[in-house]
């Protein structure tokens, strides 16, 4: 059976859930192999084995950190040369998409981004994705021998399947051209203690209706164990960081529950959240287009509705 | 400095976009325009040109209507335009588009460009991979998704925000740069700009002009093939209550009933 490479998303060897999802999907195409970039691969190995990685290709050189696309693309090309994989799956992220892009050109392989499913098929790997602000579901076939696919978080539920996870060190010499771009400074984001937006099972978002006061949104999010999102209007007003923006030019989220507070639901925002399983909205304006999408809506002031809901949820949990 | 800005002509995101019979983007039933995210790249190019001795060339690959995207950029203040127009390009995937763009950028810049600017992503395909593919094709460094940028001493420096960190990146020129919608506020064309745009040169090039073989592009030669598309079924509108002092409680009850808490 052909190998399927899965790029591991990790922090210092701590493997993230999206990697388990990708290994699970990889088994629908062939035999999964993990590609681990960075140090502390040994810490990651048990979890990669648990989700079916037969091999773990390890690239541990300071020239490839996963922070920049060009060196990462060269590293993946080196592994692909060795493994001749049927597919290379990467968790969707800005850098990963660009590494996938360079890899596609380097290897003459078809590329699909932001897939929600990947499976084997006659004539090539088959993918599913959303298009046009998630108004369509599109299925595609990658017709080249190797398919390169970036996969959105929460695409599938991870299923364990024990495998050997044999470590295969890979020596990668990064070209000078790929080293031309450098990270000269890096300021880590302050940890909010909340889950990451694209991975969260619940997202509570605030918009123009917050008037800049996100405290009820954050309080409700914390009670639910949710990530906090923001509409473009709120981000443009400087009320919340761009990295929390949900929408066409921000993050695309697809959680079990999406709570929109004080968000009108312009097409731009809908593009980022309408594939959420359950949608709840609170808005003073009963004409707000967001109400067309909701499973439950409250026409009211978020500053009274959210705190009351927060108390009620806390009470129900105790 | 010769700055080349690559832009895309896309169907209006505010309209009901759909697919054609051949599973490509339908461009006939929805008005097209300059992709919103490309306006930020045009604006940044104009600012750089205004600050120094720069000339801004706008390049697009697209059907007849794509001339509209060039026109908008010229109205904003770009100096000249290049439209790569060839029926054989219809249905090209991102790798093929980047191949055509690479040749067009080289020709437009008379060899190697000094700076290539692009938006973060198109608002139709939203893949955000063409800047990286173009950099790969041109053999240039890429420095992408910048929310601020600066050019000095033959280098481009900029800030890129990710979930984990806010990074400062640096690359030597020439380079391919992509910018986000956080970088500036694109200008509206002035009346003077609209009048001036009418006199600005726009060249139309075919694949033959670029030395690109038609067998490398187009729907039949794409490395990915759209098999089917299905419209998302409209959501059934759920229960909507008006807050009469118990809206929050009702919301919590809904969440409990749906087993979400």
Image: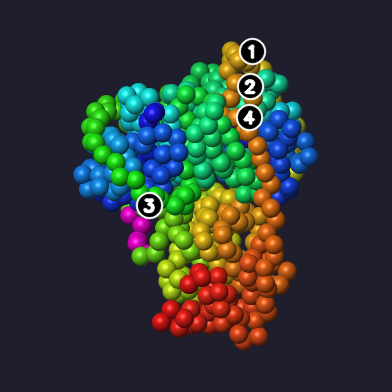
Which quadrant, please, contains the N terminus of chain A?
top left
Q: Disc 4, disc 3: CB below 8 Å?
A: no
Residue at horizontal 41 percent and vertical 82 percent from the top: A318
Q: Is residue A189 magenta?
A: yes
Residue neighbourhood size for the residue with mark 4, other residues' Cα within 10 Å, grouped as few (<14), some (14–19), many (≥20): many
Label annotation for residue B208 = 1
Magenta region's main secondary structure? loop
Q: The residue marked by circle 2 belongs to what chain? A: B
Marks 2 and 1, how far apart at CA: 18 Å
Residue A23 or residue A9, whichever sits in front: A23
Q: Vertically, is A233 above or below A122?
A: below
Residue bounds of the magenta highlight: A188-192
Residue B220: assigned label: 2
Q: Chain of mark 4?
A: B
x then y, percent, for residue A184: 31, 43
Residue that carries the numbered disc 3 in the rendered image:
A17
Label 4, on which residue? B60
Secondary structure of the residue carrying numbered label 4: strand
Quote the CA–CA distance across marks 1 and 3.
49 Å
Closer to the chain start, of discs 2 and 4, is 4
Measured from the top left, where is residue B124 in percent x and y? 63, 41
Give how far across and how far down residue B22 sits, in percent: 71, 30
The chain letter for the residue carrying disc 3 is A
Point out the residue furthest to the right here. B29
């Amino acid at each position: 059976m052909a190998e399927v490479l899965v790029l591991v998303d990790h922090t210092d060897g701590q493997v993230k859930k999206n990697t388990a999802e990708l290994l699970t999907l990889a088994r629908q195409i062939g035999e999964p192999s993990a590609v681990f970039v960075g140090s502390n691969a040994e810490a990651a190995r048990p979890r990669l084995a648990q989700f079916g990685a037969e091999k773990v290709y390890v690239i541990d050189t300071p020239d490839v950190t996963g922070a920049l696309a060009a060196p990462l693309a060269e590293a993946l090309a080196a592994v692909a040369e060795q493994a001749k994989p049927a597919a290379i799956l990467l968790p969707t992220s800005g850098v990963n998409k660009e590494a996938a892009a360079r890899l596609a050109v380097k290897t003459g392989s078809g590329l699909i981004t932001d897939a929600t499913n990947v499976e084997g098929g006659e004539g090539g790997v088959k993918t599913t994705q959303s298009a046009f602000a998630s108004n369509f579901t599109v299925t595609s076939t990658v017709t080249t021998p190797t398919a390169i696919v970036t996969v959105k978080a929460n695409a599938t539920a991870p299923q364990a399947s024990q495998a050997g996870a044999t470590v295969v060190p890979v020596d990668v010499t990064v070209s000078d051209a790929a080293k031309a771009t450098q990270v000269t400074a890096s300021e880590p984001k302050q940890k909010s203690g909340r889950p990451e937006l694209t991975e969260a099972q619940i997202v509570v978002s605030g918009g123009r209706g917050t008037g800049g006061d996100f405290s009820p949104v954050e309080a409700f999010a914390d009670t639910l164990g949710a990530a906090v999102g923001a509409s473009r209007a709120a981000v443009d007003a400087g009320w919340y960081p761009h990295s929390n923006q949900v929408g066409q030019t921000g993050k695309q989220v697809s959680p079990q529950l999406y709570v929109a507070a004080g968000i009108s639901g312009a097409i731009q925002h809908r593009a980022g959240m309408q594939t959420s399983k359950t949608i709840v909205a609170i808005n003073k304006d009963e004409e707000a287009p967001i109400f067309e999408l909701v499973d439950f809506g409250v026409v009211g002031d978020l500053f009274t509705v959210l705190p009351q809901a927060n108390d009620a949820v806390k009470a129900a949990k105790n | 400095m010769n700055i080349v800005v690559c832009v895309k002509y896309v169907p209006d995101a505010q309209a009901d976009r759909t697919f054609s019979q051949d599973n490509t983007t339908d461009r006939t039933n929805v008005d097209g325009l300059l992709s919103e995210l490309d306006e930020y790249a045009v604006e940044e190019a104009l600012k750089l040109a205004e600050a120094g001795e720069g000339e801004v060339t706008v390049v697009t690959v697209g059907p007849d209507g794509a001339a509209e995207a060039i026109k908008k950029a010229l109205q904003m203040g770009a100096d000249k335009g290049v439209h790569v127009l060839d029926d054989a390009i219809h249905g090209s995937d991102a790798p093929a588009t980047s191949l055509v763009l690479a040749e067009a950028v080289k020709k437009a810049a008379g060899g190697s460009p000094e700076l290539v600017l692009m938006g973060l992503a198109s608002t139709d395909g939203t893949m955000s991979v063409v800047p990286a593919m173009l950099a790969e094709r041109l053999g240039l460094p890429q420095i992408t998704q910048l929310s601020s940028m600066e050019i000095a001493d033959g280098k481009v420096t900029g800030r890129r925000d990710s979930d984990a960190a806010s990074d400062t990146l640096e690359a030597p020129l020439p380079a391919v740069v992509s910018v986000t919608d956080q970088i500036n506020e694109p200008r509206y064309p002035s009346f003077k700009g609209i009048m001036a745009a009418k006199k600005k040169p726009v060249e139309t090039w075919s694949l033959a002009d670029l030395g690109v073989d038609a067998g490398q592009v187009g729907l039949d030669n794409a490395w990915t093939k759209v098999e089917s598309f299905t419209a998302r079924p409209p959501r059934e509108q759920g229960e909507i209550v008006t807050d009469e002092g118990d809206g929050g409680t009702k919301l919590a009850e809904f969440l409990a009933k749906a087993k979400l808490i």
